[in-house]
Amino acid sequence: MVSKKVIAAVVVVVVVIVAAVAVIELYHPQKIYHPTVFTDVSQTAAPSEGLDPATGFFTTDEPLFTALYQQLVEYNVTSFNVVPVIAQSVTYNVSNPMVYNFTLRPYVTFSNGMPVNATDVWFSIYRGILMAQAPYASDFGNILFNDTIFADYSIEIPWGIGHALRAAGYTINGKNESQNVTIEANDLAYILSHFKLNYTDWKVMTYPDQAVYLPASEINSTDPLNVTIQTMYPYPFLLQDIASSYGAIIEPQYVDAHGGVNVSGENSYINQNGALATGPYVISSVSSGYSTIVIVKNPHYWVDGHTVNNDTIVTVNSKTHMETISTPVNDVPYVASPPSIPEIVIEYGLSHADRIADFDTNLSQISTVGPTGFKQIINGYFNPSDRNTNLVQVIPEAGALYISLNVQRFPTNNTNFRAALYYAMNYSAQLALYDNNYNGSPLAYMELGPISPSYGLYYDPVHAPLPQQNLTLAMQYLKKALYQMHAYVVLPNGTKIGNTSGTDLSSQTFDITGISPPSTLESDQITIAIDSFKLLGLNFQAKYDTEGTVLSWTSPASTPRFVDLGWVPDYPDPVGQQLMAIYDVTEGGAFGGNDAWVNNTTLQNLFVNMDFEPESVQLKQMYEVYNITDHLYAYVWMPMSDNVFFIQPYIHNFYFNQFTGYFYNLLTSQYSFKETASPSSAVTSSSTASVLATTSLLASDALRMVS
């Protein structure tokens, strides 16, 4: 129901430039580049959890995955509405959204030229469910698989697959449900890992009472184009749920030739090399540790030769309430446009200094800095005419950043102890970190999690105040906690409070765990937290784990007590994608955004059906929810950062969608990125004409300077 779209607690400040010319700065002996390839250094952490769309689970994956993978439907660029991409059309009942019928385009192909058909959809979705990795485990629970079965047996199977297997002649005769689930999972894994489409496979795929099926009329069809997805409960967000990379359609034979499909397991080869798919780009190379990934234009891109037209046709039958979303037969939506930039180099995890230097010397085209880097990156930019805030766009984002307090580990299993930390935090200092040092404009907003203010009536229905520091209240809660825990602390002034015959918590040093490599902003945030908690006589230090390590947080015991992280929704469902992501125990640690491992009985009972209730019912339930969550103190809410982009005047069509990132294939530039760059290809504009005379001196600087 939710996706593990975690985001390190840093402001995402992206700087986009297209190097039209090279220039010599007279005030500084700076070496300027005339780049031959488009380079993106904006991702501050490598996708160490892998390149498999069924495994990758961080916001740092988004631009890459959006370039490589496509879905039946996708977001219409910046809109939260969807348009058919691999599908030609989709029809469903808006009054009872459970059955979604898709018809695929007959001309879509994978990057190897093989045609895409409905069996690939069945394979891709069932593969993702069966693997039970973070994206599917948290995105499709009680939608396409039964969450209770997963919770009981740690196995995800599409709902109805057991009946489909039996109907096709499989023998499933375990002694109990656990054994039957295991047999069903292994049988499905065998079908997916040997996807030869024999008659038995067709019988399984065409059984109608399951999560995904093909019509019986498609049996033995060489090019089946119709497929149905059915949800366990009415769910109006299904199309948005499958519109990002978690709904990616991939080529089965490539998977089967490289390790197949594992029950509750990853595919190491696909993680390292990516899957074969339909997107506008394909992977050219992947360096060790994913530090550099190069993607190039898909040589068999199926959109080539078709008309790009953003006309989407929506028809609704007022009597049957059936809605159809489609495009003209030979027209393809704009979001799937062929790329104009032939090659993209993505460098992950560069230092703050390198990201600034690469941008300012014209070596990179997309970069990122925190608020304290604004002045340096703007004032150091190679073209003085562009050193101003006209380049800046600020886009708020829904989500929640936090320091989670693991409610199932000592000492954060004590509510009063958590409350003490909540009120000890210096929130004013945290928010001030986001004031950029160029003109002081804030790049974040304070909110009371878990739901963002952009969701209107869903946000803070009890009208609780925003988090603010209250050291008097913090000390009161701390004293209660210390006596309950038979512990004491030594305050900075030497005073001991609590049960002095108990455990000395001041003698211990606790870790606040963030994402490696840390940005300057993340380091500063943790420093403020350390200083705030020190006022209570508690000692902390910073610790940083890779994104890959985060995916090992599969239990309360394996999840750190204090995590500086956050959650952004995968699609615009305030209940399933924000509330439950952060408070449902099935979304604990690696499986969602519940890094505090909250497991509240009342909340869990509400969560069984809450995401499938009408809005009017949900809004009433929100009062009960907030009256519980506001007193759990499971999270210290941090400022929610905006997306801030620096965009040069001569780069065009840079679009950002909160749920998919930005689109490499839509970028255009008056500067031509080719294997061999020529000064004559540089664009003349009002901001660059003054430096054109120097370009001939710099044509030899196409190679990267080694600093």
Image: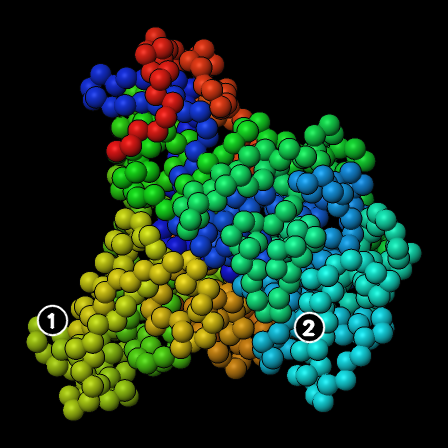
Q: Which mark is residue 186?
A: 2
Residue for point 30% across, 38% down: 354
In this rendering, the answer to whether 323 lies above or below 535 is: above
Asked whether 139 or 583 is in front, the reply is 139
Reading the image, the residue beneath label 1 is 492
- Is residue 521 rendered to the left or right of residue 649? left
Which label lies toward us, 1 or 2?
2
Horizontal and vertical percent position of residue 668: 54, 26
Residue for point 63% across, 41% down: 279
Residue for point 36% across, 10% down: 696
Residue type at tag 2:
Asn
Horizontal and vertical percent position of residue 520: 27, 48
Horizontal and vertical percent position of residue 248: 64, 51
Label 2 CA crowd tier, 10 Å (few <14, some 14–19, many 20+): some
In this rendering, the answer to whether 47 lies above or below 341 is: below
Q: Secondary structure at mark 2?
A: helix
In this rendering, the answer to whether 391 lies above or below 199 is: above
Label 1 CA crowd tier, 10 Å (few <14, some 14–19, many 20+): few
Horizontal and vertical percent position of residue 706: 29, 32
In this rendering, the answer to whether 181 lies above or below 552 is: below
Position of the C terminus, as image quadrant, is top left
Q: Secondary structure at mark 1?
A: loop
Residue 376 lies in quadrant:
top left
Q: Which mark is residue 506?
A: none
Residue for point 41% across, 63% down: 549
Instruction: Give me the C-alpha separation between circle 1 and circle 2.
Output: 59 Å
**Of the image marks 1 and 2, the number of the one nearer the N terminus:** 2
